[in-house]
Image (tube, rainbow, N blue to C red):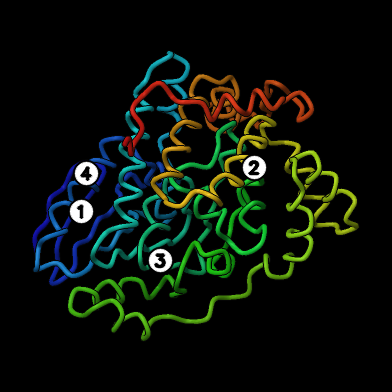
């Protein structure tokens, strides 16, 4: 076995497998720019190494694979008018695409919390394993941001309008719902992950996984599909909210209440991004679009305010600007899709 450690990413090889362990357990392994670069370096080292047949990514600690990007750093960068986040996103999105195109099996242990950037380093992989502890989500609208890391690509391709529901609300998907929406491939009980990892050091993943995969416990989305598809097919966020309220379904009305706590600008921009992502023909094209959205959000009032309310001060009382959906014009949304004024991840 060989191992190379950096403070927040542990890299080791054992047998025929290369292991990447995100190692910021106190922050639920939230990604920094240095971590993104270290993961990319490991993938480069193993891509053409005949001794490595499989790559596995996992999270240190018992809380989850990765809670997302380091949003405190993004908050501080936005407040100071910096551009460090732009460079971070460019490299992060390139990593997301690389994971999707990686020529060897890339096995993601999506145990525990897997949110935002955690989805980016896992759900684009070729073998995505969830457990009974998995909580997969893109919660960006709650901090005045828009799903990124290819999230709009993944969610726009979920069955019906399930992805729209997850993107706008930021709701957490358990194992069955992650499988249903195409965010994961296999369910393995969490206590079996160490044995699965050990087996991957000796044999090919497609020989090993059938011995560990099990049916997932029942989820929630399948039983809600009818009203989700009907309500989220509306053309505007306002119409979605109206349909939810008028549906006569208690869960739908509760969802409308949840939506009205999210950033109005983020909700409208997210819906527009999902609709555009459906018609873009590659993950790279979607990531370029998301890069423009992220750069625009960096200079918005809502991103700073959302992170302040949810993470810094934790008063859970963001003051959105503008505060209502009706005040978010088409021109406001269009500005998010304008060129970022910075090189995109996949420039021609």
Q: Residues within 10 Å of mark 4 (few under 14, many from 20)?
A: many
In the displayed structure image, the side of residue 2 where residue 35 appears, left or right: right
Residue tagged by mark 2? 271
Q: Identify the residue shown where x is 66% and y is 46%.
A: 169
Residue 165, horizontal then vertical, whole percent: 67, 52
Numbered disc in front, either 3 or 2? 2
Q: Which mark is residue 38?
A: 4
Numbered disc in front, either 4 or 2? 2
Report helix, strand or loop for mark 3.
Answer: strand
Q: Identify the residue shown where x is 78% and y is 54%.
A: 231
Real-space Cα separation, disc 3 to disc 1, in angstroms: 17 Å
Numbered disc in front, either 4 or 1? 1
Residue 195, horizontal then vertical, whole percent: 30, 76
Question: Quadrant location of the C terminus?
Answer: top left
In the displayed structure image, the side of residue 12 where residue 142 appears, left or right: right
Residue tagged by mark 3? 128
Question: Quadrant location of the N terminus?
Answer: bottom left
Residue tagged by mark 1? 43
Q: Residue furthest top?
A: 80
Real-space Cα separation, disc 3 to disc 4, in angstroms: 21 Å
Residue 255, horizontal then vertical, whole percent: 76, 49
Real-space Cα separation, disc 4 to disc 1, in angstroms: 9 Å
Report helix, strand or loop for mark 4.
Answer: helix
Q: Identify the residue shown where x is 51% and y is 69%.
A: 132
Labels 3 and 2: the sequence-earlier one: 3
Labels 3 and 4: the sequence-earlier one: 4
Q: Residues within 10 Å of mark 2 (few under 14, many from 20)?
A: many
């Amino acid at each position: 076995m060989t191992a190379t450690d950096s403070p927040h990413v542990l890299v080791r090889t054992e047998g025929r497998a290369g292991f990447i362990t995100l190692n910021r357990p106190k922050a639920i392994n939230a990604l920094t720019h240095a971590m993104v670069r270290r993961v990319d370096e490991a993938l480069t080292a193993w891509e053409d190494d005949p001794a490595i047949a499989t790559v596995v990514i996992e999270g240190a600690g018992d809380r989850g694979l990765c809670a997302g990007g380091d949003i405190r750093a993004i908050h501080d960068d936005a407040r100071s008018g910096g551009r460090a986040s732009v460079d971070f996103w460019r490299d992060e999105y390139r990593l997301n695409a690389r994971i999707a195109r990686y020529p060897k099996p890339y096995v993601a242990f999506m145990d525990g919390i897997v949110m935002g950037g955690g989805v980016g380093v896992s759900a684009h992989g070729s073998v995505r394993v969830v457990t009974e502890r998995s909580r997969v989500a893109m919660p960006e609208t709650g901090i005045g941001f828009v799903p990124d890391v290819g999230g709009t690509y993944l969610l726009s391709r979920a069955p019906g309008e399930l992805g729209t529901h997850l993107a706008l609300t930021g709701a957490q998907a358990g194992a069955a719902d992650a499988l249903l929406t195409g965010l994961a491939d296999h369910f393995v009980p969490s206590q079996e992950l160490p044995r699965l990892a050990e087996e991957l050091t000796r044999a090919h993943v497609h020989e090993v996984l059938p011995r560990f995969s099990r049916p997932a416990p029942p989820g929630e989305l399948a039983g809600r599909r009818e009203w989700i598809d009907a309500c989220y097919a509306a053309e505007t966020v306002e119409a979605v909210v109206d349909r939810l309220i008028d549906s006569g379904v208690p869960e739908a009305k509760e969802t409308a209440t949840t939506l009205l706590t999210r950033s109005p600008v983020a909700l409208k921009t997210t819906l527009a991004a999902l609709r555009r992502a459906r018609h873009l023909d590659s993950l790279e094209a979607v990531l370029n679009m998301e890069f423009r959205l992220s750069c625009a959000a960096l200079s918005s009032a809502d991103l700073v305010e959302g992170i302040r309310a949810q993470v810094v001060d934790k008063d859970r009382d963001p003051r959105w600007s503008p505060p209502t959906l009706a005040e978010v014009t088409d021109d406001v949304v269009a500005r998010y899709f304008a060129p970022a004024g910075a090189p995109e991840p996949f420039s021609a």
